[in-house]
Amino acid sequence: MRRLRSNFGGGRRVGPLRCAFTLVELIMGMIVITLVMAAMAAIMTTVAQAWTNGEIGHSTPMLANQVFARVRNNLASALYIITPADGSSSSDVMYWRADDIVADGLVEAGEIALIEEDPSTNSLYFYRSLPTTQMNAGQLTAASVPYNYAALSALTPATVKSWSFIQKTALGGPGSTTGTTDPLNVTAAIFFVNNMNDSTTQLPIVEFVLTLTRDGLSQTIYNTATVRAPAKKPY
């Protein structure tokens, strides 16, 4: 009887059994994983930056509209644009805001208002008098001093800002926010005045251009304020 040979067991081992990766294989694997992780990190960074830019791109116009609304509302009620002169432009605008300190048809110091860009703070500021109920006797006397047309033409923003009865309010920029790490900066402002040659029937127009910057992104936006009453040139 023939004995069958078994193919299992008792055979000769061809080579050693491998139970782990070699050092070279481990290094290559780590390199591949590192490259994949770096690519994923780059993609995530790009997506995050795009998301941030998208948020800034959408929120900047909203904040800009708030600034424009404040400027427009203040200018629209003006009785007369003092500076810049008709047909010229400047980074500030001074005007006769109301006849309310002494209702006599004359321009008193306390009735003068100023909107000015401050490049040192990247803000747009509004200067006007305190309410008469908050003025002391000396401030009320100073605010009641009348200015004729010649005196108004020689008036400077620095003089207006130096008056003790003037209060300062930010219309836009870091000066109008508190605790904001990424504010909307007003980096440029230009006001152009068309008084319609002091017409008594046509409404004066103030065109203004603001450059707004946030997180390295800038937008230059144009707007117009129409004064609600025809130009009333002071005496």
Image (spheres, grey):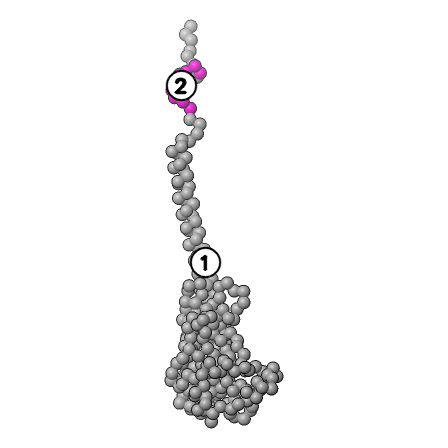
Q: Residue at x 50, y 71 (%)?
A: 175
The answer to whether 27 is drawn above or below residue 44 in the figure is above
Residue farthest toward the top in the current orientation of the protein = 1
The answer to whether 120 is drawn above or below residue 108 in the figure is above
Where disc 1 sits, the SS reads helix
Asked if residue 14 lies in the magenta stretch, the reply is: yes
Q: Residue at x 42, y 8 (%)?
A: 3
| N-term mark: 2 or 1 | 2
Occupied quadrant, residue 7: top left
Picture quarter with the N terminus: top left
Q: Residue at x 60, y 86 (%)?
A: 137
Amino acid type of disc 1? Trp
Q: Is residue 227 visible?
A: no
Instruction: Give residue 51's mark.
Output: 1
The residue under label 2 is: 13
Q: Residue at x 50, y 90 (%)?
A: 107
Q: Which residues are magenta?
A: 9-17
Magenta span main SS: loop
Asked if residue 21 lies in the magenta stretch, the reply is: no
Q: Kindly check if marks 2 and 1 are in contact, taking CB atoms under 8 A apart as contact.
A: no
